[in-house]
Image (spheres, helix red, strand yellow):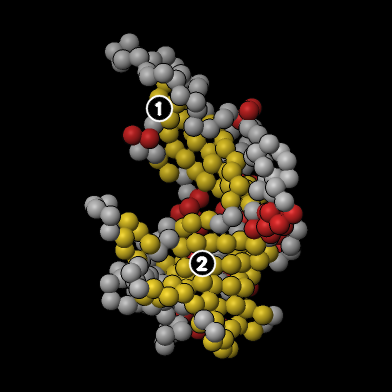
């Protein structure tokens, strides 16, 4: 597509936001330096446990050209703000809550699955975020979609509870409750294999997703869906909870050992019930894959 003559010529051509599919290369592992040299055994071990790969795909809204970028990650940050109930079901006592002290902003309940869907939903970029399309040779409106190219053995999910206001430098805390499964969180729906599969004509044709199962709190098994693979299923084993405000806060944790949960508050470690774990206002969630690779 040629640029209309009524428009001024574009600025000097910047590098494309993403490399084209033909030039797509795998970034260095977190266990090696950019020069390809080992960065130490400890870093390699961290990479093998926590590192996954995100896929970012940008699509030109005019010609449909796609560019893709792969990037390593240690954790995924999820936006909050889509829900309806301000409190946790059955929450009681200081160990159960997230520290709803004065000065924190209340919020509505939502699910972890809803946060993950929002993270991987294709979004229209703003007009000031127009991207250079190498096919059109012009700045064009574009859409962007995130997906998980490779899942890690230990998945760390951060719920973005701290938000900087648009005006000024004031930061507030979102104290909303987020429902999350204790077992069998199904991550297949958020992978590149499911979200970016296409037919011979370039149309998206996601394969039938494995069902959420066990304590996943998800969708009932769909007709014709293949059984969930263990490599896509995750069990919760740790939670970090922030209590209080930005100015005066405190962290506690829930840790699972085998089938038992414990609440950790500084030097105090006490048994916890699954109900208390489900009722906490999590900040960080740590899941381990059922089939560790």
Local packing at callout 1 (Cα closer than 10 Å; few below 14, some 14-19, many 20+) is some
> Residue drawn 47% across and 49% down?
121
Check residue 279 in the rendering and tell me which mark sits there, or answer none. none
The answer to whether residue 224 is seen in the rendering is no
Vertical placement of residue 37 versus 289, above or below: above
Q: Which residue is mark 2?
A: 284
Q: Nearer the viewer, residue 166 or 268?
A: 268
**Where the C terminus falls, by quadrant?**
bottom right
**Where the N terminus falls, by quadrant?**
top left
Q: Which residue is mark 1?
A: 140
Residue 249 position, x and y percent, is 39, 73
Residue 228 position, x and y percent, is 68, 62
Q: Which quadrant of the figure has residue 131?
A: top left
Sequence-wise, the earlier of marks 2 and 1 is 1
Q: Which quadrant of the figure has residue 75?
A: bottom right
Residue 201 position, x and y percent, is 60, 31
Secondary structure, mark 1, is strand
Q: Nearer the viewer, residue 238 or 59?
A: 238
> Residue drawn 42% across and 88% down?
93
Vertical placement of residue 30 versus 60, above or below: below
> Residue drawn 32% across and 56% down?
164
Local packing at callout 2 (Cα closer than 10 Å; few below 14, some 14-19, many 20+) is many
Vertical placement of residue 11 versus 25, above or below: above
The answer to whether residue 109 is seen in the rendering is yes
Vertical placement of residue 1 versus 176, above or below: above
Answer whether labels 2 and 1 touch (C-beta < 8 Å): no
Question: Rounded to the nearest whole Å, what is the CA distance between mark 2 and mark 1?
Answer: 37 Å
Question: Seen in the image, is 168 located left or right of residue 134?
Answer: left
Residue 91 position, x and y percent, is 42, 84
């Amino acid at each position: 597509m040629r640029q209309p003559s009524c428009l001024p010529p574009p600025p000097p051509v910047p590098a494309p936001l993403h490399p084209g599919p033909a030039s797509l290369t795998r970034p260095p592992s977190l266990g090696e330096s950019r020069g390809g040299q080992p960065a130490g055994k400890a870093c390699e071990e961290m990479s093998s446990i926590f590192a996954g790969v995100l896929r970012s795909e940008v699509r030109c809204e005019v010609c449909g050209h796609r560019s893709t970028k792969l990037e390593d990650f240690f954790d995924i940050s999820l936006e909050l703000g889509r829900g309806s109930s301000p409190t946790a079901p059955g929450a009681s006592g200081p160990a159960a809550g997230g520290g709803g002290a004065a000065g924190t902003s209340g919020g509505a309940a939502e699910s972890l699955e809803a946060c993950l869907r929002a993270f991987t939903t294709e979004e229209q970029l703003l007009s000031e975020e127009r991207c250079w399309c190498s096919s059109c040779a012009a700045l064009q409106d574009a859409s962007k979609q995130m997906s998980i190219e490779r899942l890690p053995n230990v998945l760390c999910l951060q719920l973005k509870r701290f938000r900087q206001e648009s005006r000024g430098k004031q930061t507030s805390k979102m104290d909303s409750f987020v429902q999350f499964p204790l077992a069998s969180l199904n991550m297949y729906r958020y992978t590149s294999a499911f979200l970016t599969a296409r037919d011979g004509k370039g149309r998206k044709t996601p394969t039938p997703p494995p069902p959420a199962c066990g304590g996943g709190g998800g969708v009932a098994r769909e007709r014709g869906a293949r059984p969930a693979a263990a490599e896509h299923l995750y069990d919760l084993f740790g939670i970090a909870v922030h209590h209080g405000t930005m100015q005066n806060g405190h962290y506690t944790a829930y840790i699972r050992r085998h089938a038992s949960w414990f609440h950790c508050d500084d030097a105090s470690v006490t048994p916890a019930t699954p109900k208390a774990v489900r009722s906490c206002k999590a900040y960080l969630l740590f899941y381990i894959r059922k089939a560790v690779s």
